[in-house]
Image (spheres, grey):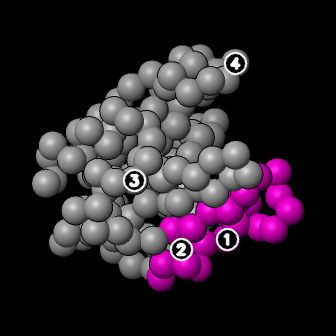
């Protein structure tokens, strides 16, 4: 059930850049912070470290909890999302091996992980909208 699902996401900022995933689906294009669903027996921080490594190839340290919310996304209502600040400590961007990066997987569309200038975040459809507003207020 969606109410039991927790998702941990990373806000990774270096200098004036933020690491985001561009999600391209047949019906829409939007941006999000890397992360994913917490697995059984895993802490929020462990999930964050694992998901960022799987998706991006980067090793991170989880920092402070930055924001939390209940998802309003259709089909995911009640799912709790936790956003942590995180610092890159190793790895190489683009070497992720997660299932979303495998062609013809159960994940539709395309996932592109890239550093974006913080100055252009206001022009992106960064989701959820709540985190976009908070990032812009805090880091710009």
Q: Where does the N terminus fall, quadrant-wise?
A: top right
Disc 2 from disc 3: Cα separation: 23 Å
Mark found first going from the N terminus, 3 or 1 = 1
Q: Nearer the viewer, residue 14 or 6?
A: 14
Quadrant for residue 19, please give it: bottom left
Q: Which residues are magenta?
A: 92-113
Task: Left or right? Give the position of 27 relative to 10.
Answer: right
Q: Which mark is residue 124?
A: 3
- Please tell me whether residue 40 belongs to the stretch shown in magenta: no
Of marks 3 and 1, the one in the foreground: 3
Task: Left or right? Give the position of 121 relative to 104.
Answer: left
Task: Left or right? Give the position of 64 relative to 48.
Answer: left
Query: Which residue lies under the disc numbered 4?
Result: 1
Q: Which mark is residue 57?
A: 2
Q: Residue 109, percent across and down? A: 72, 57
Residue at the bottom extreme? 92
Mark found first going from the N terminus, 1 or 2 = 2
Labels 1 & 2 near each other (Cβ < 8 A): yes
Q: Is residue 119 above or below residue 128?
A: below
Helix, strand, or loop for circle 2? loop
């Amino acid at each position: 059930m969606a109410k039991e699902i927790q998702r941990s996401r990373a806000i990774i900022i270096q200098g004036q850049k933020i690491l985001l995933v561009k999600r391209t689906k047949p019906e829409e294009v939007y941006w999000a912070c890397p992360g994913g669903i917490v697995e059984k027996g895993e802490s929020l921080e462990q999930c964050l470290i694992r998901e960022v490594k799987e998706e991006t190839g980067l090793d991170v340290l989880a920092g402070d909890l930055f924001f939390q919310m209940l998802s309003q996304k259709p089909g995911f209502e009640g799912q709790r999302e936790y956003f942590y600040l995180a610092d890159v400590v190793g790895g190489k961007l683009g070497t992720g091996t997660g299932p979303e990066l495998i062609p013809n997987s159960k994940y539709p569309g395309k996932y592109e992980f890239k550093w974006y200038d913080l100055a252009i975040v206001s022009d992106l459809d960064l989701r959820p909208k709540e985190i976009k507003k908070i990032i812009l207020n805090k880091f710009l």
